[in-house]
Amino acid sequence: GQQLNQSPQSMFIQEGEDVSMNCTSSSIFNTWLWYKQEPGEGPVLLIALYKAGELTSNGRLTAQFGITRKDSFLNISASIPSDVGIYFCAGRYTGNQFYFGTGTSLTVIP
Amino acid sequence: EAQVTQNPRYLITVTGKKLTVTCSQNMNHEYMSWYRQDPGLGLRQIYYSMNVEVTDKGDVPEGYKVSRKEKRNFPLILESPSPNQTSLYFCASHRYNEQFFGPGTRLTVL
């Protein structure tokens, strides 16, 4: 299957700091998605990207669809304690197969 | 309230004892999927369904079966579970790109 590499694997940051994480693939995708998973729950969609070069924001979150279509980036500005969780990227080429990254675990220290 | 439900939430069983994990959605979505989540590997798609009686293999289908006799239900069947199927399982339904995930089923096979 497709391999999506997410980095970093984990982050420990102070409240108020900005966060950056990225995801790279060995294949191109037509859609990139970013999810957040909190303990004991399923992932929840944060941002969906549909076009190479697209930059989309959702509150303090901003994600970009890489121009090569093989990567995507997520930034969180001015982190707060409730940003804690695991962030996953996911890619979709066509059809209904979704490929997920390995996740970035975010810890925010108050 | 729009939701995906899974049962049971926790299950401990023994090798070879057939089991079924149920999944139900109330959003009238055509598409449903099953994923397993393992540490360091992210979520991997097991099977997906495009509509009633239409299913297809995802990335890791070996050892699993599914059925889609009704639009709202998509059970996951392990006919002869083995210890390497110990994992956290998620059901999801979607229309377009926004997948709604269930709360997860933690399965342990001894």
Image (cartoon, coloured by chain):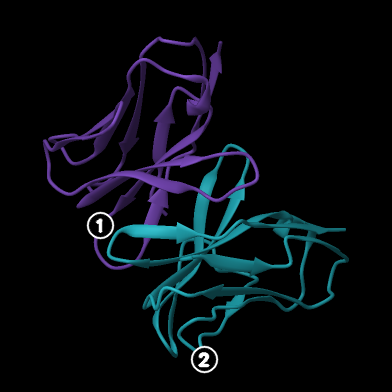
Amino acid type for the residue under numbered disc 1: Tyr
Parent chain of label 2: B
The residue that disc 1 covers is: A93
Residue drawn at (55%, 42%), measured in percent from left and top?
Answer: B41
The residue that disc 2 covers is: B69
Q: Quadrant of the C terminus of chain A?
A: top right
User: In this structure image, what is the colour of chain B?
Assistant: cyan
Horizontally, is A51 left or right of A26 in the view? left
Q: Quadrant of residue A60?
A: top left
SS for dot 1: loop
Residue closest to the far front: B1
Q: Quadrant of the N terminus of chain A?
A: bottom left
Which x, y percent locates residue A29? 23, 49
Which x, y percent locates residue A52? 12, 41
SS for dot 2: loop
Residue drawn at (48%, 75%), measured in percent from left and top?
Answer: B26
Q: Is residue B87 above or below residue B33?
A: above
Q: Which chain is purple?
A: A
